[in-house]
Image (cartoon, rainbow, N blue to C red):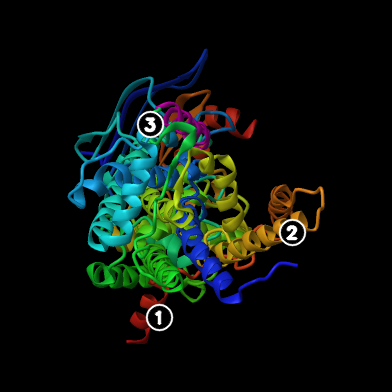
Amino acid sequence: MPLLELKNIRKDYGGLRAVDDVSLHVPEGAIIGLIGPNGSGKSTLINLIAGTTDLSAGRIVFDGDDISDFSSDQVFRRGIARGYQEPSLYFKMTVLDNALLPVKGQRGEDPWYAPWRRYWRAQEEGHATSAIDVLEQVRLLNHYDTLASDLSGGQMKLLEIARALMGAPKLLLLDEPTAGVAPKLAYEIFQQIGRLRDDHGITFLIVEHRLEILFDFVDYVYVMHLGKLLAEGGADDIAAHETVREVYFGD
Amino acid sequence: MINIDIGATAVAVLTLFGIYALMAISLNLEYGVAGVPNFGQALFVSIGAYVAGLTYTRLLPLLAGEQVIHPCRATMGAALQLRSEIMATQPVAGFINLGFTFLIAAVLAGLVGFAVSYVTLRLKEEWFLALVLLVGGEIIRIVVRGADDLICSHNGISGVAQPFYFLDDPRASAVLFMLLALVLAALAYFYSQRLVHSPFGRMLKGLRENEEVTRSLGKGISLARAQIMLIGSVIAAVGGVLFALNTGFVNTNDYVVTLTLDVWVMVVLGGVGNNRGALLGALLIAIMDRITQIAAIALNMSGSPIEFNYARFILFGLILLLMLRYRPGGLLPESPLTTDAHEILRRVRER
């Protein structure tokens, strides 16, 4: 059984059909690419899965549960975290606060317990320990008390991934994780993604325009065009796929 | 010239500071930390004051073992005389009455704050809440004023004495009331500092920074906002009770929009998001209040045609504009390192 399954999902905006009858599978532990020209419906698809946008039709099944009607906070608590195309960090908060905020089940988030440190201090220590691991992994540990707004573009992308990881997701949805990042760092970001999959078994669904990097890391690729699935297959198949080359690369 | 009693002035300023500090801490938690623009600060303060108006006229006589006399119209004078007598001779009844006043005001304001925000914050724009509260405060004020029997309409309730009124020495009594205000302000300050340093504070800051992202990181944002509005409203109502006791008078005219603006000036001047800033803002406004009062009296006595009390509004408006233009973070801007997590992480790393 796949970890995530989209069954004939559709999204209409007035007269515009942004996502049209898309079905796809994301197996557990895989890195799946989602590509397509601008306006093909990739970001809408991510928003639909993440619960920030409501479905017009179809079902989304995640880890055995139908999550089609979940709101974004429920989706997150169920185990799907997301990154955004534009960095959406808490820019006026530190790297550490950014990382700790999404941790689930924090006792200190209950205003009854919040003023009394003894109720949540031990738990917070545990969370700080995981934050040390995660931040170390993305090489941001030494910047833990830096404001997120003072990070470089690439560091912001990494912090966004680290922040999502702190919610202990099974599936991570990333919308152009290398947008606006220098080529060398973009490659590093994908190396991190590969490592997270290998070491932590996290599954990825990634929208990406830098195909030359993406194709080095993905297990399987879905291609969208005008809201529909145009093709699917391994990286090599897609790179050689004639119709895909036509709509995507224009040749 | 007028004589200024330095000691009495200091006590008056510090008492006012304690009361303003409660209001400023309340707004700082709501707006400064959580980003909820509460333009109804006067509403929550007024709840405290109106409850005081009710308990002093309806509950206090019962606690003192007397008959309740209707506080308005024909029996107004008799009722005033009765509560003044009780406050002067039966301190225990006075304190118990004050305890109930705080309790009822806190519960009522907390309920209103929670309910209003939980309903309206489900709307997309949090500024709807600002409008609802701005208008709501005014509606409640007009309704209370219109209800002739509640707190006697435009006459208001006088003789709402502070609990140390029974002391023979008015100075000692004023000093003790000042201490009460300062102790309550200190409690509110330490409590809200603890909140800001906790994971709850972190979540509230997240809400302020980016509501959409905070929701998609699994947080129930409507509940968190309603919770901080509940806490803020309780603190504001406690401030409202003290405010009424300090003037000795409950009148709907005191709880208009300008009171809300005063509290906003305190927070913006002191430092948005920083509880210490809220204290500083409250202190500066308390001092300025006194200075403008003295200046108004002095001007009046010297026969000047200028009514200086109105200059206060111009002055506060100017402060607000200049601060927002040149120092939007306030005199004491918020530190990004507020949560205890930073210190906890340092310790964990040192091990």
When asked about the image quadrant of residue A67, the answer is: top left
Could you tell me which secondary element the residue under label 3 belongs to? helix
- Residue B346: image tag: 1
Circles 2, 1 touching at the beta carbon (< 8 Å): no
Kindly indicate whether the residues beneath marks 1 and 3 are on one polypeptide chain.
yes
Does residue B134 show up magenta in the picture? yes
State the SS at label 1: helix
- Image point (53%, 62%), residue name: B278
In the rendered image, which quarter is residue B72 located in? top left
Q: Residues within 10 Å of mark 3 (few under 14, many from 20)?
A: few
Mark 3 to mark 2 CA distance (whole Å): 55 Å
Residue B234 position in % (x across, y down): 36, 51
Instruction: Give the quarter of the figure containing the N terminus of chain A.
Output: top left
Quadrant of the snapshot with the C terminus of chain A: top right
Residues at marks 3 and 2 touching, judged by CB atoms closer than 8 Å: no
Residue at the image position 40 percent from the left and 59 percent from the top: B201
- Residue B326 has which mark? 2
Q: Which residues are magenta?
A: B128-147
The amino acid pointed to by label 3 is: Ala
What is the CA distance from the residue labelled 1 to the residue labelled 3?
Answer: 69 Å
Other-residue count near label 1 (Cα within 10 Å), few / some / many at <14 / 14–19 / ≥20: few
Is residue A81 shown to the viewer in this render?
no
Q: Which residue is mark 3?
A: B74
The subunit letter for the residue under badge 3 reads B
Mark pair 2, 1: CA separation: 35 Å
Q: How many marks?
A: 3
Instruction: Check if mark 1's residue and mark 3's residue have beta carbons within 8 Å.
Output: no
